[in-house]
Image (cartoon, coloured by chain):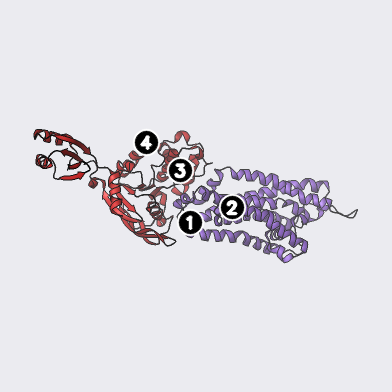
Chain colours: A purple, B red
Amino acid sequence: MSAVLRAEVLKITTTRLWWILLICVFVIGGCYATLPAVVALLQHRPAGSASPFSDPGTVRSIYNGGNTVSRILAMVLGIVAIGNEYRHRTLATGYLATPRRSRLLTAKAGSVLIFGLVYGLTSVIAGVLVAVPFVLARHGAFALDQVTTWRSLVLGVLSVALWTMIGMGLGILIKNLLAALLVGIVFAYLVEPILSAVCYLRGWDAGLNLLPTGATNAMLSTTSPVLFAGQHPYPWWLGALVLAAWCLLPAVAGVLSAVRQDVE
Amino acid sequence: MPPIIIDRLVKSYDGKLALRNLSFTVEPGRVTGFLGPNGAGKTTTLRILVGLVAPTTGSATFGDVAYADLPRPQRTVGCVLDATGHPGRTGRNHLRILAPTAGVRDRRVDEVIEMVGLTEVARDAIGSYSQGMQQRLALAGAILGDPSYLILDEPAVGLDPEGIRWLRTFLRDFAAQGRTVLMSSHVLNEVEATVDDIVVINRGQLIAHTKMSELGIGAGSTKVRVQNPDLALRALAHLAAQVEIDRDGHGAYLRVHTADVGAVGAALFSAGIVVSELVGERRDLEREFFSMLESSW
């Protein structure tokens, strides 16, 4: 690991936030994962039909059920990682050690991505743990014989990690930590889900596919209505590209602006 | 070790000039005080020097190398600027974060903690530190990479008298090893005993750049009031190269350019002159500073 990256990882591990968020990812992510499972149980089915958990898309929705909240927690980590530097005016200290600002910010992005991966992994593990009793009780299938499922699990981890980049971008562009958190959470928790819900209910698949939620569903091959999965999702790789654009554009814009600015 | 070279710096913020063609050099092996009233441009100059602020024109370099081009800046330049670190972090962890890029190990971290006298509180959160302890921690961070240059922005702020004495000794020792110290301050009396050279700026312009010794600090003068100034003038001629007659609200008096009040009194006594006032006047930096600023108006 390069010296700058090591310093940035230390910055995260020497404060409490990262493990508080990690516990939240596991607990709240696990709770969220039960939603697609419960909805699948409640869905009306003709008598004698197969187990609700024999549909791989449904099972994958449980595996990645924590995604909608884990990604917000990952975003929070990204916002705070940079926002705290502005808040406590410590960015200067970082720039003094690493005057090539793009290097410092890239290292910071790398450090939050590492923790994003940990959160993503934790979220998926929580989802799998939640899925086990449901699938066993209703004689479903874990769908682990399908490549799509494994791809969904891996991309599920990556998609959570990517959201740290939205956070970093927001944190650089909105220098006030609380304002950045507010904007990020209101967008990710209210605005985006409402837009997704409207697109979902109206059947506007094009709009849905271009929003982070729809892109994530396409990427993860999840089909639960709880996750607003549309009827005509993009192929998984296009979904991944759309999500990557959402996550990386703010980060790149933020880095480009920070590199030029005077540090107060 | 090459000097710090500030060369024709201009910085404008939204059309307002913070620095107007500022040039000076800071010599190695000396402690240079960088003085000026608040808003004079001291902090802006220091921040340009370490690459945090971009100058509009001009340059600030270590020899001919800009801060951003130093291969491992922490090993060449140590900085004490305003902020310390995240209040939830321990002082030791704050320094451990600075260690990888400085290329030093945790053993060196404990060493500098010891040097600044923070060993007992090293594992406490920075948020619980007094301002003086935070200044010591900032200094520990600055010297972590064993640099050749120290740049300090108002380091005396928040230090108690004992802390100021400690800082003075530390900076004097640092410069005595042939290294360079540039410290800004508006606490003039603190600087007076620490610095070798002073650079005074006001409104972004150089007002004075001089050696402390040339300021004649402590040389002082003696104020004498007698019935007949002309008589006294002759009696004191051998004591000082310069004796002048001045006037105040109580009439004429003599200013003898010597700090030796006793010798003046003895000379007047042996000449049989009756003295009505005899006062030693010590020149100090505070007065020098303000007279420089006033003449720049």
Quadrant where the C terminus of chain B is found in the figure:
bottom left
**Chain under callout 2:** A
Chain of the residue on which disc 3 is drawn: B
Give the CA distance from mark 1 to mark 3.
Answer: 24 Å
Same chain assignment for discs 2 and 4: no
Same chain check for tags 3 and 4? yes
C-alpha gap between disc 2 and disc 1: 24 Å
Between marks 3 and 2, how big is the CA–CA gap?
38 Å
Q: Nearer the viewer, mark 2 or mark 1?
A: 2
- In the picture, the disc for residue B161 is 4
Residues packed near mark 1 inside 10 Å, few (<14), some (14 to 19) or many (20 plus): many
Of tags 3 and 2, the one toward the viewer is: 2
Residue drawn at (80%, 55%) of the image: A55
- Look at mark 2 in the image and give the residue it sits on: A179
Of the image marks 2 and 1, the number of the one nearer the N terminus: 1
**What residue did someone put label 3 on?**
B105
> Looking at the picture, which amino acid does disc 4 mark?
Pro
